[in-house]
Image: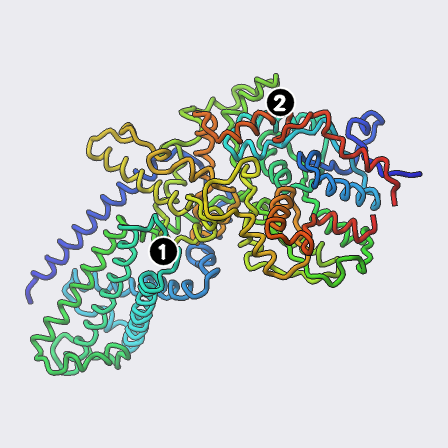
Amino acid sequence: MSTYKVPTMAEMAASGDSPEILFWVGCAGSFDERYKAVTQAFVKILNKVGVSFAVLGPEEACTGDPARRAGNEFLFQMQAVANIQVMNGYNIKKVVTACPHCFNTIKNEYPALGGNYEVIHHSQFLQQLINEGKVALQGGGEFKGKKITFHDSCYLGRANDVYEAPREVIKALDVELVEMKRCKTKGLCCGAGGAQMFKEPENGKKDINIERTEEALATGASAIAVGCPFCLTMMTDGVKNKDREDDVQVYDLAEMIAKDMGI
Amino acid sequence: MSILPQIAFLLIFAAAGFFLYKRITYLRRNIFLGKKESRNDQPEARWKTMLLVALGQKKMFKRIIPAFLHLLIYVAFIVINLEVLEFIIDGITGSHRIFEPFLGSFYGVAMNIFEFLAIAVLVSCVAFLIRRNVMKVERFTKPEMKGWPTLDANLILVIEIILMFAILTMNATDQILATRGVEGYALLNGLFFSDMIQPLFFNMGDGALIIIERFAWWFHIIGILAFAIYVTYSKHLHIFLAFPNTWYSNLKPKGEINNMPEVTNEVNMMLGIPVEGSQEPPAEISRFGAKDVNDLSWVNVMNAYSCTECGRCTSECPANITGKKLSPRKIMMDVRDRAEEVGKSIDAGGPGFEDGKSLLGDYITKEEINACTSCNACVEACPVNIDPLSIILQMRRYVAMEESGTPAQWNAMFQNMETSFSPWKFAPTDRFNWADSVKNEEAK
């Protein structure tokens, strides 16, 4: 029986190989029960397409994003410098990640500390695979013809101007993409950015993820697509809060593609 | 003819110029209370940003109705200032409508254009007054708008309306006098808008009309000079500062938070990485992060003086929308208020920054900065590229690194990251466990 392969950089280096890309898994992708499924789906796609990749495995550490955004620059740089040492040690050139926070940090903030890589988000990578015809979508899968809305992640959209790649990926599934009132440059945050994921919100009259979920539900979509582990958590919680978990699903883009590919 | 009006004009003009100069010097000094920061890279991109965003008002057009009304006032402001040039020359030389003989029939056309714009300003200002005071558009009624900010906004609109009335009154009476053949008044080929109000003055004698015409002239020019000075005390400063403010925009990806090189050296030493010495002189470390205006960059302070308090940032802020205390507009207003307080104190020989107060604590609370999701909605929304997020993050740095005052849950997250290299408390050795099941699954 041939199984899926998840090579690590250490294994690759030991056999004198170097992969085309490093798949940066991130903490949520490694530890969060729900997001592990996204990591696994993405790895299956990489296997199926035959992309030469590796992960850092136990050598990966948090990029430091939440520490920097909570104001702890020392801790951020400790994480960042250590990660850069590891990545430079393996002579890594190209990084793909399914987390917009990791994506933003490695792409925009690591260069100042000596880490220079080509970094792309998995939505961009999936779009490339689709455009190159490497991902053979069946199109008749469970999403065909369904109404799907996409929630823009701040660190993908406004932070890095990636708006179209995730939408192209969704459209490739032969679905009806419906936009929320606040989308793209005007997209509303899920409430988790800026290290808010790791603390209770300040006092207010409503939680941000509820506000955003209401907007998503108002589109009449049967699924909310996201491209970020924090957004996935916040939107899933929002849908549960609204008692709609039976008829509205929250998916990451990679999961949707993997499902359509039948893997 | 008496030379007295010319002397009076020159005196008023010189006094206004002198006062304006003092105000500009004061504002410039206040802006440079902030720390040095070089933003002179990529001049082409900077000119382009300024042309598109400030001159072209690109970002205003996300909201089409106010954008259109604002555009009318903006175009009128620029074009009518050409007429002010004529006012000034007339005032100094004692001439009347000095451009008229040179421009011939085109002068009348130009005057009609000015009048059309004056009417456009009138209509727009009335619409804006209605939006603020009758419709009470939500972003104009937030807590930080109480008192002076609301009065300031209304005053500007009312002053503009009065100034436009002065132009129309002056033109109407001027043309009646010209029709009557009074010496010194040139007959233009019909002024569409002011001709309509001429009947108001028909039964007046020449003397009375001359007085009204002169009064309107003086009122308009003195009004404009006074307005120019008023602007330096007002949120309306954006009409000038929008230009440098957009030129000095942050051109990096919005998600990037600037590196602190003074921290990097220490981190490298702690990790046993050789520090590339003597490349850069050690940055002068006053404080990590920002507690007060002098910890911020001068660009942050210029941002504050450029803010016209429109509140588009606040109306897009997810924290504010859901009832949290954070309002990006208030952050900007607080920075300006504190810079003003310190600036005035310095000028009065007072304690300046050493007055026992600070931006963080006395103006902005931790509750406000802790509510930010760093989503950049405020930055995206600002029509003149103000960056409230930069200020919020610098304050968070101060709280975290100087006060160790971050919320307990963040401290727990810090601790997890230090010990487990993840914001959650998981064993680092378990990081790769997610792959176990995939590695045993049959590949399809």
How many C-alpha atoms fall within 10 Å of the one at disc 2: few (<14), some, or many (≥20)? few
Residue A60 on image: x %, y %: 69, 29
Q: Is residue A165 visible?
A: no
Above or below for A262 versus B433: below
Chain of the residue under label 1: B
Residue B157 disc label: none
Residue A101 coordinates in the image, percent (x, y): 61, 40
Q: Give the amino acid at mark 2.
A: Thr
Residue position marked by numbered label 1 in the rendering: B140
The single residue placed furthest to the right in the displayed view is A1
SS state under label 2: helix
Q: Residue at x 23, y 80 (%)?
A: B195
Residue at the image position 37 percent from the left and 45 percent from the top: B330
Residue B225 position (above or below residue B290): below
- In percent of width and height, residue A51 lies at 81, 42
Mark 1, secondary structure of its residue: helix
- The reply, left or right, for residue B181 in relation to residue B46 is left
Residue type highlighted by circle 1? Phe
10 Å neighbourhood of mark 1: few (<14), some, or many (≥20)?
Answer: many
Residue B291 occupies quadrant: top left
Q: Which chain does the residue under circle 2 lie in?
A: B
User: Residue A205, position in %: x, y?
Assistant: 46, 48
C-alpha separation, residue under disc 1 versus residue under disc 2: 47 Å
Residue pictured at 21% horizontal, 64% vertical: B87
Determine which residue is flagged by label 2: B419
> Which quarter shows the N terminus of chain A?
top right
- What colouring method underlies this structural image? rainbow
Residues at badges 1 and 2 in contact (C-beta under 8 Å)? no
Out of B381 and B52, give the one closest to the viewer: B381
The residue at the point 20 percent across, 61 percent down is B221
**Nearest to N terminus: mark 1 or mark 2:** 1
